[in-house]
Amino acid sequence: MNLAETTRALVAPGKGILAADESTSTIKRRFDAIGVENTEDNRRAYRELLFRTPGIGKYISGVILYDETIRQKAADGTPLVKLLTDQGVLPGIKADLGAKPLALSKGETVTEGLDGLRERFAEYRGMGAVFSKWRAVITIEGDDIPSLYAIRVNAHALARYAALSQEAGIVPIVEPEVLMDGAHSIERCNEVTIRTLRTVFNQLAAQHVRFDGMLLKPNMVLSGKDAKDRAPAPDVARYTVDAFRDSVPAAVPGIVFLSGGQSDDEATVNLDAINRYAATVGAPWQLTFSYGRGLQAAPQKAWSGKKENVTAAQRAFAHRSRLTAAARMGEYSPEMEKESVPA
Ligand code: 13P
């Protein structure tokens, strides 16, 4: 498959992406919450459970892996990557090395990992990765943060990453995440999101990135997590789709949202509202999911590190995937929360 074909497969109707690329320190936070020790074997067992979930290829087009995971084997010796490809799911890789303090800034960050990236992509490609992801983090705090400085350096790095990824024949997923932490209004999130996306697409164009061979992974335009009177789903949908119409080229085949700390049902309801609104205004892109927490909260809780819970956890994962895939088509209804999925 070439870049454009892989991109289209990732955003095929009725499907979206599972972000299972938590770094070792991030997965520790998730495991701490369910009382599971953060060992290499537990991380392997957990990801194996997800990837072996029966029928998951119906709703999940691709899975983003962490460097450790793309090298791991299942308990029976099968490479974890093969578990995915056997289900018709495309393997992807987290390419960045995390957000680090930005020099001479007021506590903002820049994402690192460009040095040696060409060589790492060659290795990942050999291990089967056909797409990749790079996450930049943009914080909202008071009137001065984010600074133009932080937006610019992160946009520049995102474009350098995306160009290297396309050069290696790997579809880049460009992720400039405006965090929902804080008590800011939806209007403030809207303003920061538009400024960030315009800067990012400016850099992508300047650095020769092909829009038809990439995906954008943005935040939804939301009220801050601690805001009073948080905006409801129809407002989220309108602000979000209108922000993209102001800043994202129509040639980009798809927009794959992060869940970003929304609860799983909130992330589903908002994705559904976004797709319903997008249909009324004729938005040009596929609008789907690339959720981490939005898909994994339920299976993590059901599993809680116990072998005897594997089937229940797989059921929970399949159920959440099915509902999120319905929302991606604007076909979700809250009654579906009660339906069960045979494992
Ligand atoms: P969340 O959906 O949990 O935000 O994770 C998606 C992701 O890949 C963040 O980089």
Image: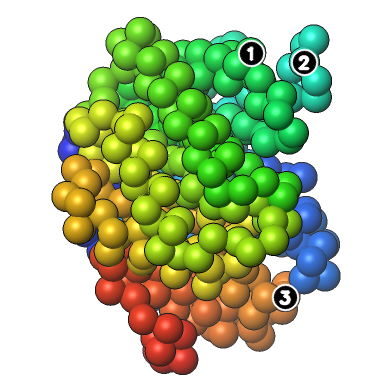
Is ligand 1 within 8 Å of the beta carbon of the residue shown at mark 1?
A: no
Give the position of the C terminus as an image quadrant: bottom left
Q: Secondary structure at mark 2?
A: loop
Classify mark 3: helix, strand or loop. Answer: loop
Disc 3 crowd, CA 10 A, few/some/many (<14, 14-19, 20+): some
Left/right of residue 67 with respect to residue 218 in the rendered view: right
- Residue highlighted by disc 2: 105
Distance from label 1 to label 3 (Cα)? 42 Å
Report crowding for label 2: few under 14, some 14 to 19, many 20 or more residues within 10 A (C-alpha): few
x and y, in percent, of residue 244 in the image: 35, 38
Q: Are marks 2 and 3 in contact (CB under 8 Å)?
A: no
- CB within 8 Å, label 2 to label 1: yes
N-terminal of the pair, mark 2 or mark 3, is 2
Q: In the rendered view, would you say 56 is above or below 242?
A: below
> Disc 3 marks which residue?
304
Camera-side residue of 245 and 80:
245
Q: Mark 3 and mark 1 in contact (Cβ < 8 Å)? A: no
Q: Which of the numbered marks, if any, corresponds to residue 149?
A: 1
Amino acid type indicated by mark 1 = Tyr
- Which residue occupies 73% across, 56% down? 226
Q: Position of residue 252 (x, y in %)?
A: 26, 33
Image spot of residue 193 (x, y percent): 50, 35
Q: Is residue 31 visible?
A: yes
At horizontal 59% and vertical 74% (from top left) the residue drawn is 298
- Which label's residue is closer to the chain start, 2 or 1? 2
Distance between the Cα atoms at labels 2 and 1?
8 Å
Tag 2: amino acid: Ser
Question: Which-is-in-front pick, marks 1 and 3?
Answer: 1
Location of the N terminus by quadrant is top left
In this view, the residue in front, 173 or 3, is: 173
Residue 237: numbered disc: none
